[in-house]
Amino acid sequence: MLALAAAAGAIVLVVAAGNWAERFELQVKTDALRQAAAAHALGLRGLVEKHDFLPHAAARHPDVQDLLRAPGDPALRARVNAYFADLQVTTGAAALFLVDRAGMTLATSNWNLPTSFMGQSYHQRPYFEDAIRGKRGIFYGLGLTTGQSGLFIAEPVGAAGKILGVVVVKISLEPLQATWMRGSEPVVLRDSRGIVFLSSVPAWLFHGIRPVSAADARWIAEHVQYGNRRRFEVLPWTVSAPQGVDGFILRTTLDGQRARLLALDTPLPELGWTLTVTSDMKEVVQARQAALALTALAMALVFVGALYWRLREKRYAEQQSARLELERRVEERTRDLQKAHAFQKAMEDSLLVGMRARDPEGKIIYVNPSLCAMVGYSAEELLGCRPPYPYWHPDDLEKQARESDAALQGRAAPHGFESRIRHKDGHDVITMVYTAPLVDAQGQHCGWMSSVVDITAQKQAEARQREQELRLQRSARLASVGEMASTLAHELNQPLMALSNFAVAARALAAQGPSDMIAGALDEIVDQSKRASEIVKRVRSFINPQRALYERVPVATVIAHAEALLRPELQRHGVTLRLSLRDGGASIRGDQVLLQQVLVNLIHNAVQAVQDLPAPRRCIDLASELAGPAISIQVADRGPGIPAEQLDQVFTPFHTSKPDGLGLGLSICRTIVEAHGGAIAVENRAGGGAAFTFTLPTVP
């Protein structure tokens, strides 16, 4: 009986020791799984938080909002594409893209890749549906274009309380899955419907922990969450819940072998996911077997107990080390956040542009140091102030009140407005003010943010530049007086010579007795006097351009008058003027007398070039031809031409090849042509002689 009792007691002791060892090891592994789950969850949250600000920041970019207002602007779309591509490279996101209210993609970071999202519609995606209703959208699924999985975070883009479109950032979780696959213990992530979408065991992907309902399957198909998949098999798991632990026992097959795992679920409510971490139960089984063996073998109990204790201490040290490592990482993360906040504050304080934030009623709620330095008031003096603000200029109170009311009502000019303010010490400051809506993290409009730029120095520089330009213009006009005097002498030479010739002819005719030719000669003297007066008046217009007489003049009229003026000289030298007019009756806008003077000078020079040639070669060609919206007029002779080394100098003032010339004729021609918006050029003809061509714009 005693032996039986002892045997029974020993069996009970062995069984109790085995059960205790099993529960203890389960608890230890559960604690380890809890720490591993916390680390994995921290990594997931950190990955999401790392990119969480991206859609919010991109939605506030002016180019993004402008593209939604003007989706057909190619230059604006190119800037947004480049901006998104730069954000994608900088942050490591998989992609960023912008969709309009209809769900069509307007801009994307992968615009230049074969898998570009450009022109794709994402209206059926849940993140778009949430964002277009003004909420933040989060959704995990396979990409409609690339077929690659990712987490999509969507942010509505709003202006003046109206949603214009949606900015979406795609985050790839494949690097995280690759890290899990390198581990020895299976890790699983499933959605709210129990479907596994991320796993270190590829065979478990897109399987459910329970049958997927018909309604859920329809929802997944409608939103194309997992591509073309319509059926989701149940995971080959057999689950049991041991007493006294938070996890559960999972029986399955891994790599063709049966496995028994301890698993622990960790909900991630902010993402709607559940994280499952596992650990092999072999150690639990070994612990139970060890306890049974230690109890059964009393002689080896101390040895086995010591060995187990050492194993436990080692495991505890590893857990302690893991806990310390986790705490160290948390401290590093906290320091990083503090540094980021300090860096952001340093950036705001170092801005040279003044920043001012106001609530919807106009109360100042934020100012940066640059604005305080600009107005001379401290932040404590400005915070809480309502219009009129202490730095408003006393002479512009009514104007600044109107501008402030317009900004608070959302009617501020997008290109900003100029405002004069009064510094606390009394001097004036000229500023440019740009105002934009202030939107909080929930997408709610909570006030107005203004950028204030000091342009006082710029305004002063512009005033100095205008004054200097006026002085330079006065100096230029004075400097041209000398040239105008020479111009008058040159231009009056021809009509004065004509007056002299006609006067001599009239005197000779008078000596012969009364004649009708005397009246004609006197008429010519009157005409040449008028012409000299017109030349004086037109030359004065060079000094004061407001006096120039510009009118619509037919090209044929200018040519006909010039020919009539030079007909006596042409006949005297036996020179033939051949006309080739193909202007189609075109007209130009200009001063008729000055334009006639250009032709007179050019034809007169041509006459001098051919007057010593044999009679058959004393010929001048005058041609006019339409050239698009301009008329081209050419005067060509058959004289000796112009030396090649002097072609670039013929229009230079006082340059002449004539012994008695002033060298101003061609310079005056160029001045007149350019004053009429045209250009003049010269070239030597292949058969001999020179050709002067000038073009003038025509009028309808």
Image (cartoon, rainbow, N blue to C red):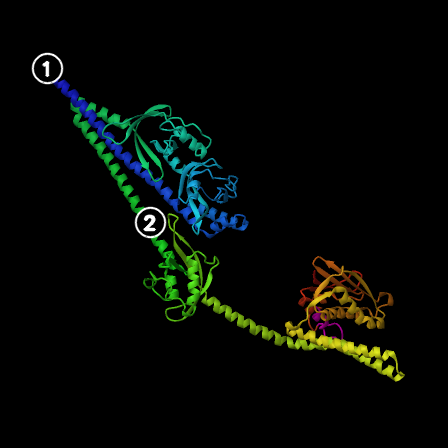
> Badge 2, how many Cα within 10 Å: few under 14, some, many 20+?
few
Question: What's the residue type where badge 1 is placed?
Answer: Met
Q: Is 441 situated left or right of 244 in this image?
A: right
* Image: 248 above or below 658: above
Secondary structure beneath label 2:
helix
Identify the image quadrant of the C terminus. Answer: bottom right
* Image: 649 above or below 242: below
Whole-percent x and y of residue 71?
A: 52, 48
The image quadrant that residue 568 belongs to is bottom right
Residue hosting label 2: 337
Whole-percent x and y of residue 3?
A: 11, 16
Q: Nearer the viewer, residue 69 or 336?
A: 69
Marks 1 and 2 in Cβ contact (< 8 Å): no
> Badge 1, how many Cα within 10 Å: few under 14, some, many 20+?
few
Identify the image quadrant of the N terminus. Answer: top left
* Image: 421 above or below 407: below
Whole-percent x and y of residue 430?
A: 44, 66
Q: Which mark is residue 405?
A: none
The image quadrant that residue 641 belongs to is bottom right
Q: Which residues are magenta?
A: 655-669
Residue hosting label 1: 1
Identify which residue is drawn at 40% across, 56% down. Answer: 448
Secondary structure beneath label 1:
loop
Q: Nearer the viewer, residue 79 or 324?
A: 79
Q: Main secondary structure of the magenta part?
A: loop
Q: Is 307 situated left or right of 478 in this image?
A: left
Residue 297 in view, yes or no: no
Identify which residue is drawn at 84% across, 72% down. Answer: 573
Look at discs 1 and 2 and give the one toward the viewer.
Answer: 2
Residue 198 highlighted magenta (yes or no): no
